[in-house]
Amino acid sequence: IIPGYFDQKNNFIYAVSGETLLRCSNPDSNSTWKDFGTIGEMFFLSGMAYDEARNILYAASNGGVRRCNNAEDPASWVDIGGVGGNQCILFVEEENALYAGTGAGVYKCTNPDSAPQWSNTGGGIEGSTVYGLVYDKQHSAVYADNDGRGISVWKYQDGIWTDISGEGAQPDYLYRTGSMVYDGKNDVLYLAGGISGIMRCDHPATDPVWTEQKPDGGLYDFNTIAFDDNRNTLFAGALEPDFPGMRTSDQDVEKFSKSKGVWICEDPLNDLSLKKMDGVASGDDISWLAFDSERNILYGESLSKGIWRYSPQ
């Protein structure tokens, strides 16, 4: 099972198994899984997005993008086109538009609910693989992380892509979608930077300033993060990388193995220091995290234990 999306408003987790989408209702208490339809050429689910105003669910995969016209009816999936090789997807309510991060840059779909029209946003990010997309409502900006020309972070604003990486924002390795979160209250962008650790960018739309942090000693591959905006707390998931070039010795393998699990940063605005959370999927490869701020629950997926939940004190 591969988690795809947490819908905090309706308290659902969506995940994919083979070509079948699954939905978990009430994951905070009496979890109930339901078959939510076959989406088609779904070798992996790379991202999902929800249009709350129209009750429409979108799913992105290697086979393009699909729309569920009624998020309560799993039989209503339709293909709305797009390009293959999707890595992530983002719905922007203010524009009624979808953004899809692909292996060839970012594509935008206007009116995806009724008359979808896809276009390549182009710019300097074109031709690169985009792993994560987040939206900054205050500045009407989309942020993307990519690895096409050296891993970097870009801003899309007023139809123009701008590289905002700057010094210190060049993570060595990004694993999957979900590697960025945006804190709108404090105008801060957080990035899981793989073996570079965790990164923070203050006021990314106007005057980006980057800070990088990773624990002392050992080797780490932070690939997913979640943010609790009530407590201003950041959670990071680490796994053992599957690229042999990143593990050049038995000592490297041992160090990566010890770093696997969930880490916490209790004051990321002022101090990006991370500490390991004992007992929370400790020693597991963590591939996905999401935080439910309304119910104070951290959800995660580990490659050995599946989907789990944890309630921080």
Image: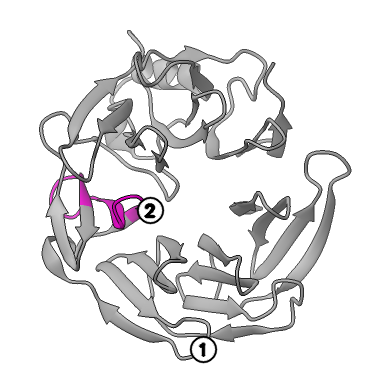
Q: Which mark is residue 12?
A: none
In the figure, 213 relative to 209: above or below? Answer: above
In the figure, 230 relative to 52: above or below? Answer: above
Image depth: mark 1 or mark 2 in front = 2
The answer to whether residue 17 of the structure is visible from this angle is yes
Residue 300 lies within the magenta run: no
Residue 105 location (% of width, % of height)? 24, 66
Residue at image point 66% right, 53% down: 1
Residue at image point 22% right, 46% down: 205
Is 1 left, or right, of 66 in this rendering? right
Which of the two residues, 226 or 284, is positioned nearer the viewer here?
226
Residue 71: which quarter of the image? bottom right
N-terminal-most mark, 1 or 2:
1
In the figure, 313 relative to 111: above or below? Answer: above
Q: Which residue is mark 2?
A: 137
Residue at image point 79% right, 67% down: 35
The C terminus lies in quadrant: top right
What type is the residue that disc 1 sits on? Ser
Residue 288: which quarter of the image? top right
Residue 140 lies within the magenta run: yes
Q: Which residue is mark 1?
A: 114
